[in-house]
Amino acid sequence: MSRLRTATLQNLPTLMKTGSYDLIHICVAALVAYAVTGNLIASLTLSLLEPTVQAVAYFFHEKAWARAAERRRAAEAGALPA
């Protein structure tokens, strides 16, 4: 199995959550940008660019939090008496 496929399958819940978050963010950004600019093209451009960059950042943010939680669980398990 390719590395990309393996990484995708291992991260599927986070990727799905990221995708749904991105879709909501794009819709909100489009409405806000249109309300501010009154320009459909500008609002679509802004609403696709910014949330897409945010989605990539969000994915890595979620992975960092998951890693921190895993380290915390490991530390707590090591601190418990046998």
Image: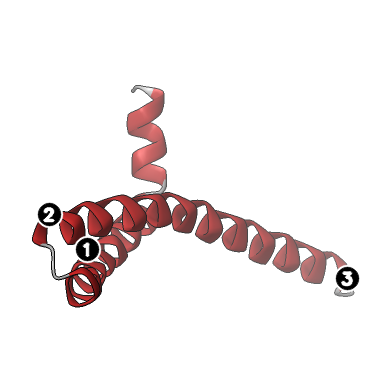
Nearer-the-camera pick, 74 or 14: 14
Q: Which residue is mark 1?
A: 23
Specify whether 57 is left or right of 12.
Answer: right
Q: Cβ–Cβ below 8 Å for labels 2 and 1?
A: no
Image depth: mark 2 or mark 1 in front: 2
Q: Cβ–Cβ below 8 Å for labels 3 and 2?
A: no
Image depth: mark 3 or mark 1 in front: 1
Residue at image location 16% in from the left, 57% down from the top:
44
Measured as percent of width and height from the top left, residue 3 is found at: 41, 25
Give the CA separation, mark 3 to mark 1.
Answer: 42 Å
**Which quadrant of the structure image shows residue 63?**
bottom right
- Give the position of the C terminus as an image quadrant: bottom right
Q: Which residue is mark 3?
A: 79
- For the residue marked with disc 2, what is the amino acid? Ile
* Mark 3 nearby-residue class (10 Å; few <14, some 14–19, many ≥20): few
Give the CA separation, mark 3 to mark 2.
Answer: 57 Å
Compared to residue 25, the image places residue 14 above or below, namely above
Residue at image location 40% in from the left, 48% down from the top:
11
Mark sitting earlier along the chain (3/1): 1
Q: Which mark is residue 41?
A: 2
